[in-house]
Image: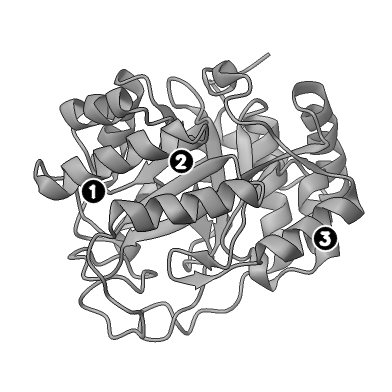
Amino acid sequence: MIRHDWTLEEIKAIYNTPLLELVYRAASIHREYQDTAEVQVCTLLSIKTGGCPEDCAYCPQAARYNTDINVHGLLKKEDVMSYAQKAKEAGSTRFCMGAAWREVRDNRDFDRVLDMVKGVNELGMEVCCTLGMLNEEQAKKLADAGLFAYNHNLDTSRDHYEEIITTRTYDDRLQTLENVRKAGVSVCCGGIIGLGESHEDRIAMLWTLSSLPSHPDSVPINALTRVKGTPLEHLPKVEFWDMVRMIATTRILMPKAMVRLSAGRAEMSMSDQALCFMAGANSIFTGEKLLTTGNPSFEEDHMMFELLGLKPREAFKEQEAGCC
């Protein structure tokens, strides 16, 4: 049964299960609810890079930090469409467009994004955007343009949040998720580990996600990418086993969700990734960039899929999967 009433103590007990037993339990649930041979293949493109007024301590796109990213304004539609077509030909079925904005504004740039959404949707791909905060009317406009999913991560627990971000609140994020749900758009929402948080913070974040009115359609689990010039550049690398534990716990709590092995995958071996898939991950980003940081290439992922006997999940399959 799909539950939305997990307690913090129950989640803590799952999270702290001995690792091999935890992976076995998650793998069993994964087989019950998902085709374990299928992995959703997504591609993420930064359509507007840098210059963001937010102060997210992990992000190289914040204007206040001195990082080595190449700042650029909103891309032209034809450039976005060319990238989306290449991604589709390489096997991606979901195309996500990210803009370094604090929030969506009703202006020409938003109109241009709506046009991009229409264009990518016409390619037969699931279209996802991550554009910052948005209101109900803007979410409805995106839905009408053909948007399939909207990404807006919680990042961490409510208690740890103010240590990482001060320019918007946790409730701001939850309100954006509510606006997305009301528009009938699938919610993509997860978090980042390695931000200096405790295990209790990770458990609390998963409690918030699993307690939403409907579980997110996609739950990205990210490991902090330490970028020079950001306040978190000196934090230690996330232990691989922590990623496995987070993925397995997420799979148990939200059986129908796509659990995305996201940032941090570039530093994992193929065998590391195989264990993540066994623990319940069934979605990845492919392509050489995740917005501004490195990621395995299409070619590397093709080789991995062939070796592990995996296949890309079809677009628009079981759209009701996130409505749980």
- Can you see residue 202? no
Instruction: From the top left corner, tell me how far across and down residue 234 is, in percent.
Output: 48, 85
Q: Earlier in the sequence, mark 2 or mark 1?
A: 1
**Outermost left residue:** 107
Q: Amino acid at mark 3?
A: Met
Kindly identify the residue that appears in the image at 37 percent across and 38 percent down.
119
Instruction: From the top left corner, tell me how far across and down residue 229 is, in percent.
Output: 35, 85
Q: Amino acid at mark 2?
A: Cys
Q: Which residue is mark 3?
A: 303
Kindly identify the residue that appears in the image at 81 percent across and 34 percent down.
36
Q: Secondary structure at mark 1?
A: loop
Q: Earlier in the sequence, mark 3 or mark 2?
A: 2
Q: Residues within 10 Å of mark 1 (few under 14, many from 20)?
A: few
Residue nearest the viewer, comparing 305 with 174? 305
Q: CA distance from mark 2 to mark 1?
A: 16 Å
Q: Which residue is mark 2?
A: 189
Q: Amino acid at mark 1?
A: Thr
Q: Residues within 10 Å of mark 2 (few under 14, many from 20)?
A: many
Considering only vertical position in the picture, is 187 above or below 43?
above
Look at the image and tell me in which quarter the N terminus lies: top right
Considering only vertical position in the picture, is 162 above or below 187?
below
Q: Earlier in the sequence, mark 3 or mark 1?
A: 1
Q: Which residue is mark 1?
A: 169
- Can you see residue 167? yes
Q: Residues within 10 Å of mark 3 (few under 14, many from 20)?
A: few
In the picture provided, is 23 more to the left or to the right than 62?
Answer: right
Instruction: From the top left corner, tell me how far across and down residue 140 is, in percent.
Output: 24, 24
Q: CA distance from mark 3 to mark 2?
A: 28 Å
Q: CA distance from mark 3 to mark 1?
A: 42 Å
